Image (cartoon, helix red, strand yellow):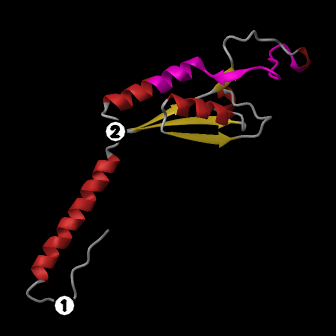
Amino acid sequence: ATINPPQHRNSNDSEVLVQRSTLHQSHLDNETANAAIMKILVPIKRVIDYAIKIRVDPSKGPHAVQQSNVKMSMNPFCEIAVEEAIRLKEGNNNEGEVIAVSIGPKQCSETIRTALAMGADRGVHIETKGDVRGDYIDLQ
């Protein structure tokens, strides 16, 4: 907020200017403090559960994995990343924010809920169509 000098000057003008400049300085201090808060962005990916036996779907080609009726979960390496982000936040006197981000179909919101249950502060879901694969090669 910018402070404009008063239009009319009288004997109390210098006191008013001092009070306003103090208010302006405290506002800047609050903005600086908010800017210093650490925000940790953790990308998470929904994958086939690691304990499930993967089956090849021959109708889609030799490299296609059967995904219907298969349990999905958060990538175990993403779980480690969320845990480490929470540790970093806790080591910083809980000053900061852990944000879990996932790109994919509606079902990815379940993965974000898992990250929130682990201790993330916010979740961001960038929704894509169900038939769009979110492989890293496709995103490049």
Number of residues whose C-alpha sits closer than 10 Å to that of mark 1, classed few (under 14), some (14–19) or many (20 or more): few
Is residue 71 located in the magenta-colored stretch of the structure? yes
At horizontal 49% and vertical 34% (from top left) the residue drawn is 120
Q: Is residue 115 visible?
A: yes
Q: Which residue is mark 2?
A: 95
Vertical arrangement, residue 10 with respect to residue 52, above or below: below
Tag 1's secondary structure? loop
Report, in whole angstroms, how far the alpha carbon at label 2 lies from the one at label 1: 44 Å
**Residue 40 sits in quarter:** top left
- What mark, if any, has residue 68 been given in the picture? none
Residue 96 picture location, percent across and down: 37, 39
Please report the bounds of the magenta region as a residue range.
60-83
Q: Residue furthest right?
A: 59
Q: Position of residue 83 (x, y in %)?
A: 46, 24
Comparing 56 with 75, the one in front is: 75
Towards the viewer: 118 or 32: 118
Residue at 21% of width from left, 62% of height from top?
25
Looking at the image, tell me whether mark 2 or mark 1 is earlier in sequence order.
Answer: 1
Quadrant location of the C terminus in the rendered image: top right
Does residue 43 appear in the picture of this structure? no
- Residue lying at 62% horizontally and 40% vertically, measured from the top left: 125
Foreground: disc 2 or disc 1: 2
Q: Secondary structure at mark 2?
A: loop
The quarter in which the N terminus is drawn is bottom left
Q: Is residue 18 left or right of residue 93?
A: left
Of all residues shown, which one is farthest toward the left? Answer: 11
Residue that extends furthest to the front in the rendered view of this protein? 117
Dot 1 corresponds to which residue?
8
Question: Image check: 107 left or right of 68?
Answer: left
- The kind of residue tagged 2 is Glu
| Number of other residues with Cα within 10 Å of mark 2, as a class: few under 14, some 14 to 19, many 20 or more | few
- Say which amino acid is labelled 1: His
